[in-house]
Image (spheres, grey):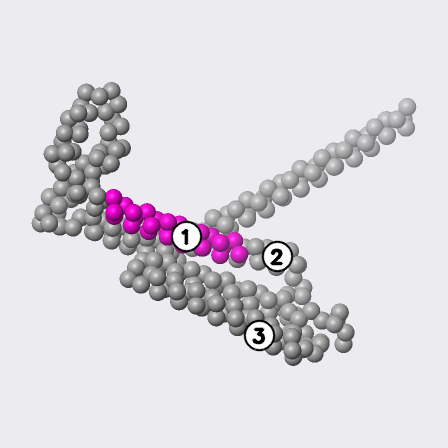
Amino acid sequence: ASSEDSSSLFNLKEEINFAEACWCFLILLTATIIIETFTEWIEWVLQGKGHFLVIVNKVYKEVMILGLISFLLFCSEQGPLLDDLDHSWIISFEFAHILLFFIGISFCLLSVVVCVLVSRGRRSWDAYERYDIQELTAYFAAKKNHTLKFLSGFTPKGQAVQFRLLKHVFIRSHKLPPEFHFQEYVHNVMLNNVDQVLDVEWTSWLAVALFTLAGALLNQLYEWQDDHDSSEESTHYYSSTSTEESTHHRW
């Protein structure tokens, strides 16, 4: 069989060039080693940072699911299963699952940004603790009669006062000891919230599926209404043309 008659190894219509197959195997093997080394380096850098490792594992999972779906789709395209299916459906399926993959990756990257901001916030909270109470009191006393005194709350010292008040209210309401490390507690709570957000429940996926189904139905309804209006316009046009021709013949 000629090479024009075949499109894939699955068709078994051409002999495999062993030398080319070996080169391709070496290229894939090299790429695999590079990717695996890079992922191991990322895990080594993130040692002791469990929340970031959770995000990395989530990315691994998304990539694995994408690869599995792509492989199954490729195998289906080579067999007789999808011969009678319109090619536009295959393209739409590929678009949908790649879009879902990018949404998942963007979600993970957003979680990384949140974790970084929380870690930076932790350093700011530690800096707020180092402010002297008398220094903060003198600062706000000097701003008492200032025209733009409401902007004082957005300055580092203003943020420090708000943080101190929040810490005091929290410790007092929960009857905690004064040496309670409030900054570390808030930091861990926020990172745990990020982990919980990454763990998407099945009900969330069900809600997304229902919204998508509703959008598809609305689109079908819009297309049906548009086709219906077009057919009515065509009928009205041909009816008017026939009436004019009949009137012309009578005259």
Percent coordinates x, y for residue 11 in the rendering: 68, 74
Q: Main secondary structure of the magenta part?
A: helix
- 231 left or right of 23 in image: right
Structural distance between the alpha carbons of marks 2 and 3:
28 Å
Between label 3 and label 1, give the one nearer the viewer.
3
Q: Amino acid at mark 3?
A: Phe
Between label 2 and label 1, give the one nearer the viewer.
1
In the rendered image, the quadrant that contains the C terminus is top right
Which residue in the structure is indicated by mark 1? 109
Q: Earlier in the sequence, mark 2 or mark 3?
A: 3
Which residue in the structure is indicated by mark 2? 91
Q: Which mark is residue 178?
A: none
For residue 148: magenta? no
Q: Which residues are magenta?
A: 98-124
Residue 128, image quadrant: top left
Q: Amino acid at mark 2?
A: Ile
Q: Earlier in the sequence, mark 2 or mark 1?
A: 2
Does 5 sit above or below residue 184? below
Q: Amino acid at mark 1?
A: Leu
Which residue in the structure is indicated by mark 3? 25
Element carrying mark 2: helix
Residue 60, image quadrant: bottom left
Q: Earlier in the sequence, mark 3 or mark 1?
A: 3
Q: Residue at x 60, y 72 (%)?
A: 24
Does 5 sit above or below residue 177? below
Q: Residue at x 18, y 48 (%)?
A: 182
Find out whether the residues at labels 3 and 1 contact each other: C-beta distance under 8 Å.
no
Q: Nearer the viewer, residue 181 or 139?
A: 139
Is residue 203 visible in this depiction of the protein? no
For residue 111: magenta? yes
How many residues crowd around disc 2 within 10 Å: few (fewer than 14), some, or many (20 or more)?
Answer: few
